[in-house]
Image: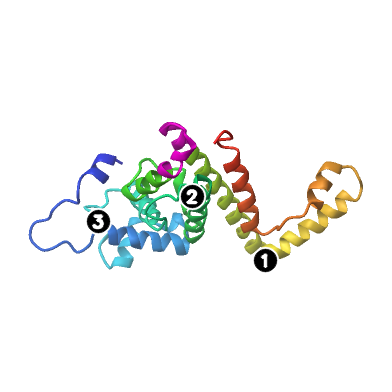
Amino acid sequence: MDPELLWAQPERPRRGRPPAHSRATITAEAVAIADAEGLAAVTMRAVAARLGAGTMSLYSYVPNKETLLELMIDQVSGEHRLPDEPSGDWRADLRQIAREQRAMMRRHPWLPAALTARQTLGPNTLAVVEHALAALAPTGEDARARLETFSLITGFVVSYVSYELGQEQASETAGRTSGELRDAHARYLQALMAGGNHPQFAQALAAPGDPSPEAVFDRLLDRMINGLTAEA
């Protein structure tokens, strides 16, 4: 996958009849397949079937699945709903970015795994990175440190959503809701803690706090953000 050919050059002009498809339409169909069936279901054959086209005809638009994956990641990155300019409150802005990332990964459950294989940054992704770097400017950190900070936050969101999705898959496999499994786990731990052999863990379980995934995400996110640039 050559990033220069993918992002720096437009799609090849075609002689004769107008092209039947485009990278954008092919990518949109691939995203739809991944959303419904998972990333493993995305093949050139499957995308061609949705478009009513021959499989080989798509290779003139997208040379391989690796390139298609890069296009998919960048296309969904365009879904970030971010303001035109940062607010000036870098912590609030970073929270907003992270929440947008989580929402996007929840809409596209294949995305956390796909990001681990990403090889390049497309225009939509770069727009998000640029916004994040501008949002972090009030910290006083240099540009490289701000980029690393944003990478840490993104890594946290990927990890958290991957765990969420894994738990939901386990619940589905078990034929119980995530709430039912969470309650069963809580009862097990409470019975175990009654023995008095794990006093520190017992205190942690007894501490007040909303156990919902959204609330836990926000609490962990705040801890991450507050520890990133303690001097800011």
Q: Which residues are magenta?
A: 133-148
Q: Is residue 75 visible?
A: yes
Which residue in the protein does label 2 denote?
Answer: 93
Quarter of the view holding residue 75: bottom left
Q: Which label belongs to residue 177?
A: 1
Q: Which label belongs to residue 56?
A: 3
- Regarding mark 1 in the picture, which secondary structure is present there? loop
- Regarding mark 3 in the picture, which secondary structure is present there? helix
Which residue is located at x 87 percent, y 49 percent? Answer: 193
Q: Amino acid at mark 2?
A: Asp
Q: Amino acid at mark 3?
A: Met
Which residue is located at x 26 percent, y 56 percent? Answer: 23
- Marks 3/1 in contact by CB < 8 Å: the verdict is no
- Regarding mark 2 in the picture, which secondary structure is present there? helix
Q: Quadrant of the N terminus?
A: top left
Residue 205 shown left or right of residue 63 in the figure: right
* Residue mark closest to the camera, 3 vs 1: 1
- Nearest the viewer among 49 and 121 is 121
Q: Quadrant of the C terminus?
A: top right
Main SS type for the magenta part? helix
- Nearest the viewer among 114 and 96 is 96
